[in-house]
Amino acid sequence: MKNKKIIMYVGIILIVLILLGVGYIIYNNVKNNKEQVIYEYTPEEEITGEQLRQTVITLYFLDPNTYALSPEARQIDAKELIDNPYELLINLLIEGPKNENLLKLIPENTKLNSAQIKDNILYIDFSEEFIKEQNLGKEQEELILKSIVNTVTELTEINKVAILIDGKEDSGFPDEELMFNKVFVRE
């Protein structure tokens, strides 16, 4: 019986000591945190107006490993998008990817005649090089169109795209697998 009382008293004393130790540690941490001085962060370099105007656009090119479209993000000056963002995006597609692992889909020597929005449809008028002497097959032709449509529909105001060749709406690829007599939407 005496042993049980001794063990109980020792247990109570240990619990009280542990509680006092934890309380002391908490008290010191709170006290030290109040005394900390907060210094203002000063960046090494000020952010310029040009850096503030940067925005990210997404262009779609071919990934030859998966034979699927792959997005390429680019940072550009937002002011470039003010005048005619559609022409800018299409011309960047024509130039091709910066990423060496992606391939350009729009045929060489293709020129953009115009890109205008009418009745919520973006009309993109390419030079005849877009289709001239192209025998790519339906799958490749679809990838070209998806690259264009996916890129321009990144802009919220664009939902449909019509393709023209030198102003003609009823053109198509020479193999006549894909014709441009309809509007294209993002899939």
Image (cartoon, grey):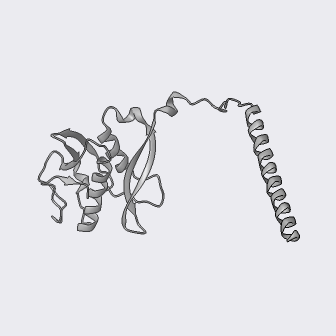
Q: In the drawing, does residue 76 fall left or right of residue 26?
A: left
Name the spot of residue 73 as percent of width and height, x first: 44, 49
Q: Which image quadrant is residue 7 in? A: bottom right
Q: In the drawing, does residue 57 fall left or right of residue 13?
A: left
Name the spot of residue 165 as percent of width and height, x first: 18, 49
136 lies above or below 61 = below
Identity of the residue furthest to the front in this view: 1
User: Quick check: can you spot residue 137?
Assistant: no
116 or 48: nearer the eye? 48
160 or 84: nearer the eye? 160
54 or 23: nearer the eye? 23
Name the spot of residue 13 as percent of width and height, x first: 84, 57
Residue at horizontal 81%, vertical 50%? 21
152 lies above or below 30 = below
Image quadrant where one finds the C terminus: bottom left
Image quadrant where one finds the N terminus: bottom right
100 lies above or below 57 = below
Tally of numbered tags: 0
Residue at horizontal 34%, vertical 41%? 88
Name the spot of residue 72 as percent of width and height, x first: 43, 53
Residue at horizontal 39%, vertical 49%? 58
Residue at horizontal 86%, vertical 62%? 10
Q: In the drawing, does residue 92 fall left or right of residue 165?
A: right
Q: Which image quadrant is residue 105 in? A: bottom left
40 or 184: nearer the eye? 40
User: Quick check: can you spot residue 149?
Assistant: yes
